[in-house]
Image: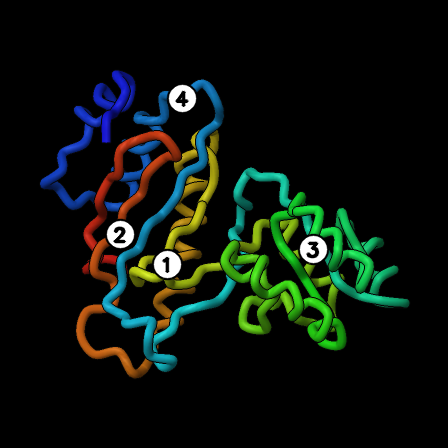
Amino acid sequence: MKRGKKYLEAAKAVDRSTLYDVADAISLVKKTAVAKFDETIEVHIRTGCDGRHADQQVRGAVVLPHGTGKQVRVLVFAKDAKAAEAQAAGAEFVGGQELVPKIQHEGWLDFDVVVATPDMMGIVGRLGRILGPKGLMPNPKAGTVTMDVTKAVHDIKAGKIEYRLDKTNIIHVPIGKASFTDEQLSDNFQTLIEAINKARPSALKGQYLRSVTIATTMGPGVKLNPVKLV
């Protein structure tokens, strides 16, 4: 993959053979954010899990103390009083059956998170082929299938993020923007790592966190020492 001049220049600041501590890694990542927009800072965690086994799945959600810096658009599948509750809580879109053809046939996906009350999951299930691959399917473990739609919407707006293994057993999550202070990014990172450590599957033998890398959207990765994060 060919890299641009800015990337190559930024990459010179990162020693690939060094495993940095959190404070140094965050400081370095902020310095390598050279894009003209406010880049997202992401954490990539390679685990020792085998996601093909149900007892080695890692999935959950955590509210980052300083949010992600992103405006999150929430779609809630609910009816009657729960629909009114979702609107009052600040959800951008609220509906039911009528949204299915809009998503299925019109390709409407102008939302970032989907919440559903349990009684609406029969309807939402029809959208599994579209929402599933995009990581948008509501899930009880992530707190997005719930009767407490007010709390779900408030948590998401406050900076709740979902983490899960991808097909290669890596977790990818945002922890903020390059414009955040070092302290804000550090707080968010520590909150995330604590949640992921708590989610360690009991069936897993051996090393859980194989590698942990922090990077901006467009910048080089900075590796942390995973042993110090457990």
- For the residue pair 156 and 24, the one nearer the viewer reads as 156
Which amino acid, mark 4?
Ala
Q: CA distance from mark 2 to mark 1?
A: 10 Å
x, y percent for residue 166: 37, 60
Quadrant of the rendered image containing residue 114: bottom right
Q: CA distance from mark 3 to mark 4?
A: 31 Å
Q: Which residue is mark 1?
A: 193
Which amino acid, mark 3?
His
Horizontal side of 26 relative to 79 (left or right) equals: left
Q: Which residue is mark 3?
A: 154
With respect to residue 9, does 149 lie above or below?
Answer: below
Q: Which residue is mark 2?
A: 212
x, y percent for residue 172: 38, 52
- Do the residues bearing badges 2 and 1 touch, measured as CB atoms within 8 Å? yes
Which residue is most to the left? 17
Circle 2: is it few (<14), some (14-19), or many (20+) Cα within 10 Å?
A: many
Q: CA distance from mark 3 to mark 2?
A: 29 Å
Which is nearer the N-term, disc 3 or disc 2? 3
Which of label 4 and label 2 is nearer to you? 4
Which is nearer the N-term, disc 3 or disc 4? 4
What is the number of the mark on residue 35?
4
Element at label 2? strand
- Do the residues bearing badges 3 and 4 touch, measured as CB atoms within 8 Å? no
Which amino acid, mark 2?
Val
With respect to residue 34, does 24 lie above or below?
Answer: below
Q: CA distance from mark 1 to mark 4?
A: 27 Å
Which amino acid, mark 1?
Ile
- For the residue pair 192 and 161, the one nearer the viewer reads as 161
Q: Quadrant of the N terminus?
A: top left
Which of label 2 and label 1 is nearer to you? 2
